Amino acid sequence: MRKFQRLRVAPQVAILIVVMALSDQSGICAVTLLAAAFHECGHLLAARCLRIPLGCLRLSLLGARLEIRGRMLTYGEEWVLSAAGPLTSLLISLAAAPLWRYGIWAQYFSCASLVLGLLNLLPIQSFDGGRMLETALAFFGGETVARRGMLLFSFTFLFLLWAFAAYFLLRAGDGLSLFCFSLSLFLRFFDHHREQK
């Protein structure tokens, strides 16, 4: 079995990482990137345990995506592979929590891992939680039920995320990055479904 050998990073992501590294005075961005790396390692470890042949890991502005080589995944494999990243993030957050008393970095890392794990569990298409739900719906109800269900769940949760971000921005005067992130996901959702018609 040929080993996983490729990491493909979109040019925008590479530029963003360099800009963040150069301008990150607090170190929060570096700790968040470390939390994201552990999250992706959870997916890679699950793929290795399941003996899933991987082509490459692609990093884009909206996250990472593992490309499977040579075969289709079973519903169970897809579900476990999707769950591995959030589970890793949540376990890392829990493991780092006792270290909070030793410094702010442990707090940042634990919180970044927790947020990353919980955010990825949202039932939104292209999120790990969305892939887990879509897999379960396809297994129990078929592909049509999965497609329609994901349309409904994705729209609902994207709208709730956007509404929360808008409320937080207007009420607290903070959270512009969350608002922009949720708006970009919403626009991507509509663009994706317009292309499929």
Image (tube, grey):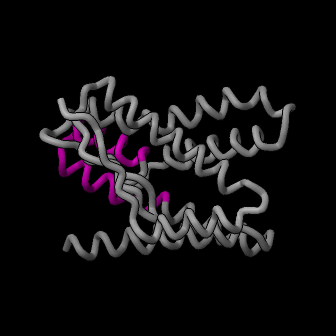
Q: Which of 88 and 102 is in front in this view?
A: 102
The residue lying at 46 percent from left, 65 percent from top is 61
> With respect to residue 8, does 166 lie above or below?
below
Q: Give the range drawn in magenta.
A: 128-157
Report the residue that reaches farthest toward the left. Answer: 70
Report the residue that reaches farthest toward the top. Answer: 49
Residue 144 position in % (x across, y down)? 18, 51
> With respect to residue 185, does 97 lie above or below?
above
Residue 69 position in % (x across, y down)? 18, 42
Q: Can residue 115 be seen in this view?
A: yes
Residue 171 position in % (x across, y down)? 78, 71
> With respect to residue 175, does 142 lie above or below?
above
Q: Can residue 153 be seen in this view?
A: no
| Magenta region, main secondary structure | helix
The residue lying at 19 percent from left, 74 percent from top is 197
Is residue 179 highlighted in magenta?
no
Left or right: 65, with 28 as reference point: left
The residue lying at 47 percent from left, 65 percent from top is 13
Residue 89 position in % (x across, y down)? 56, 37
**Residue 25 lies in quadrant:** bottom right
| Quadrant containing the N terminus in the rendered view | top left
**Residue 40 lies in quadrant:** top left
> With respect to residue 10, does 38 lie above or below?
above
Is residue 146 highlighted in magenta?
yes
